[in-house]
Amino acid sequence: MIIFSDLVNDDGGCQEHSFPFETIERYGLHGGGQIIFLYPTPHVTGEYDTPDLPERLMKKQKRFITSMYKLSKQGKVRAFFYHVPDDPQKRVTFLKSRLQHAIPATVFEIVWERVSKMIDTIIVAVRG
């Protein structure tokens, strides 16, 4: 399972929906699966932007990663985290490399096309 997320759940109105740790534990019971998190630096913008927000969001990311590593150490799930580079020129190379390692070659081209479109859409949405 590959999850693209900033790991902080900071969007307005989303705080009541927490990450489904129970579902992740059930997924981990099967033993053959793994979860790969590809996460960017949290983006700070809009009405919620305060001087301490970037630091708070980074702490939330670290707490989430720590909680998943705890589950991993307990043998409940295999989880891996990879930070997506902030530099746009490094980002494409990084994502292509990570996805090539995570996805069987026969499926990679289809997934890469969809991921590329998704990333372009996210970047356009974030920039406004």
Image (tube, grey):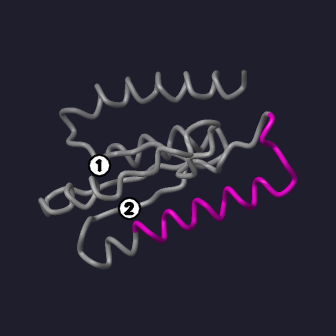
Residue in the image at 35% along x and 58% along y: 21
Disc 2 marks which residue? Answer: 80
Q: Which residues are magenta?
A: 47-68
Residue in the image at 36% along x and 43% along y: 99
Pinpoint residue 35: horizontal percent, then vertical percent.
31, 55
Amino acid identity at mark 1? Ala
Residue in the image at 29% along x and 58% along y: 22
| Disc ID at residue 102 | 1
Which secondary structure dominates the residues rendered in magenta? helix
Depth check, front residue: 34 or 90: 34
The verdict on residue 65 being magenta is: yes
Depth check, front residue: 99 or 63: 63
Q: Which of marks 1 and 2 precedes in the sequence?
A: 2
Vertical order, 125 against 91 (above or below): above
Apparent side of residue 113 relative to residue 65 in the rendered image (left or right): left
| Disc ID at residue 93 | none
Amino acid identity at mark 2? Phe
Residue in the image at 44% along x and 69% along y: 67
Apparent side of residue 32 relative to residue 112 in the rendered image (left or right): left
The verdict on residue 83 being magenta is: no
Vertical order, 20 against 117 (above or below): below
